[in-house]
Amino acid sequence: MYIPEAFAATKVGWTVIGPLILMLVLFALAVPVWVALGVTALLILWVTGALPLALVGESVFHGLDAFALIAIPLYVLTGDLLVRTGMSIKLLNIASATMGSVRSGMGTSTVLGCGFFSCISGSDAAGAAAVGRITISRLIKEGYSPAYACALVASGACTGILIPPSIAYIIIGMVLGISTSTLFIAAAVPGVLIMISIMVTNAVMNRVRGYERSSGRFRMRAWLASVWDGRYALLIPAIIFGGIYSGVFTPTEAAAVAVVTTIAVGVIQRTLRLKDFPSSLEGSAKVCGVIVPIIAVALPLAQVLAITEVPQSLVGAVNAVTKDPTITIFLMLGIFMIAGCVMESTPNIVILGPIMLPLAQSIGMNEVHFCVFMVTSLGIGFITPPLGLNLFVISGITGQPVLSIAARAVPFVLAMLMVAVLLAFVPQLSLFLVR
C-alpha cells in the first residue's frame, strides 16, 4: 500500500484507539458498514493529522482506480446469466450424476453443485440463493430435515469465496499488492479441501441421523449424457480456469470472456432474451453498490492505520506476550473467526489484511499463504451468527429460522475450522502449485 513519505508516523494512542472503539459501537448500532468505516477514517485523520483531509478524495480515487476491481461485477453477472439461461441446473445435474450413486448422494451432489457454481460466480450469497432454490426441496423429499437441508446448502455455498475465481481473493490481492492470478492458483487446493470436508461431514451426519437412505448405481451412460447436455455450462469454468492458469487471460479478462460466452450460448439456445439484460445488469450493480463503497472508505482507513504504526504495534504487543508461532497462528485464527462472525468479508479483508500481514510475516508466514489462511478463516463466518450472510439468504428463501439453520450448521463449522488449521500449519497445501 502506498504511504506518502512526507508524513511521519505517530505512536498509537487514544487518538487511534478511541475512533476504533467508536467504529465498533457504530457496527453494534447497525450503522451501515461504509458509513462507520468512513467516519472512523476521517476522525483518525482529523485527530492525528497523519494525512491532510484534502488528500482523502485522491486516496479514495487511487484505491478504486484498479483494473482488478472490474472483475467483480463481471463474475457476478456471469453467475446471474448462468441461472437465467438454465445452465446452473445442468451443472447440478452433472453433480448429481457424478455423486448420486453413494448413500448420501443427493446431499453430496448438492455440495459439489455449490462448488461448480463457485467456479463461476465468486460469490457466497449468489451461490446460496441459486443452488438453494433448486436443491432444498429435493433434499427434503430425500428425507433431510428442512433446517439441516438449509444448513447443508449454506455451508456448501461457503466455497463461493474459497474456490477461485473469488471476489475475496480479488480484493485481498488488490489491498496487499499480490497478483490475483497467483492467489487463484494458491487457493485451488484449499478451496477443494473445504468442499470435501463439507461432503464428508454430510456423509457422517447422514449415517448418524439416517436422513438419506436411497442409493443407486453409478451409470457411465447417464453421466456422459449429463455431461454432454451440460457441455456449454462446463465451458464457462473451463474458459475461466484455462485462461487464467495458462496465462492467456488475466482474471479480469477471463471474467469478460466468460460473460460474452454465457450471453452467446444463451442467445443461441434461446434461453436468454433481450428483456433479461436490464435485470441482470441491475443485480450485478447492486452487488457492486455494496462492495465498492466499503472498499472506497476502508482504503484510507487502512492507510492511516499503517501510518500510525498500528500493524507494528500489534506485532510488538504479541511478541511481548509470546513468540511461539503456534500460539500466534491460533490468535490470528481467533481474530479472523470473530471478525467473520460480526462483519462481512470485504471490510474485514481491507482493514485486517494490512494489519495482520506483518504479524504473519513475523513468524515466517508467506504472504500468499497468509491470504489463503485469512480468506478461509473468514469464510467460516458465512454460516455463524450473528451475521452469517448465507444463513440469512437461505432463511429468506425457505422461511426457516436463522438460529435453527445455524444450529444444524455446527458440524460444518467444525469441519471447516479443521481445514483452516491444517492450511495454517501446512503451507505446502497453498504454495506447491504456485511454486
Image: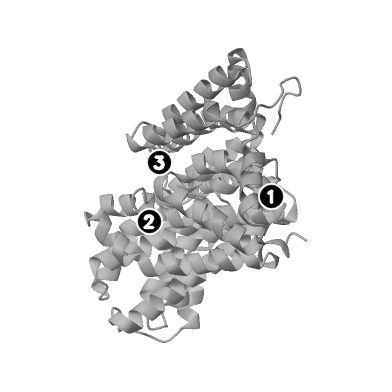
Do residues under tags 2 and 3 come within 8 Å of each other at their CB atoms? no
For this rendering, which residue is in front, 373 or 159? 373
Observer able to see residue 215: yes
Q: Which residue is the site of mark 3? A: 273
Tell me the distance, in whole angstroms, between the alpha carbons under discs 2 and 3: 38 Å
Disc 3 crowd rating (10 Å Cα; few below 14, some 14-19, many 20+) is: few
Q: Amino acid at mark 1?
A: Ser
Tell me the distance, in whole angstroms, between the alpha carbons under discs 1 and 3: 33 Å
Q: Amino acid at mark 3?
A: Arg
Q: Earlier in the sequence, mark 1 or mark 3?
A: 1
Q: Which residue is the site of mark 2? A: 384
For this rendering, which residue is in front, 258 or 114? 114
Q: Nearer the viewer, mark 2 or mark 3?
A: 2
For this rendering, which residue is in front, 217 or 29? 29
Quadrant including the C terminus: bottom right
Q: Position of residue 113 (x, y in %)?
A: 45, 64
**Residue at left 59%, top 61%?**
327
Q: Position of residue 354 (x, y in %)?
A: 63, 41
**Residue at left 35%, top 78%?**
205
Q: Which residue is the site of mark 1? A: 181
Observer able to see residue 296: no
Q: Quadrant of residue 164 in the image?
A: bottom right
Disc 1 crowd rating (10 Å Cα; few below 14, some 14-19, many 20+) is: many
Q: Position of residue 421 (x, y in %)?
A: 56, 66
Tell me the distance, in whole angstroms, between the alpha carbons under discs 2 and 1: 29 Å
Q: Nearer the viewer, mark 1 or mark 3?
A: 1
**Residue at left 48%, top 29%?**
18
**Residue at left 48%, top 28%?**
19
Q: Earlier in the sequence, mark 2 or mark 3?
A: 3
Do residues under tags 2 and 1 come within 8 Å of each other at their CB atoms? no
Label total for image: 3
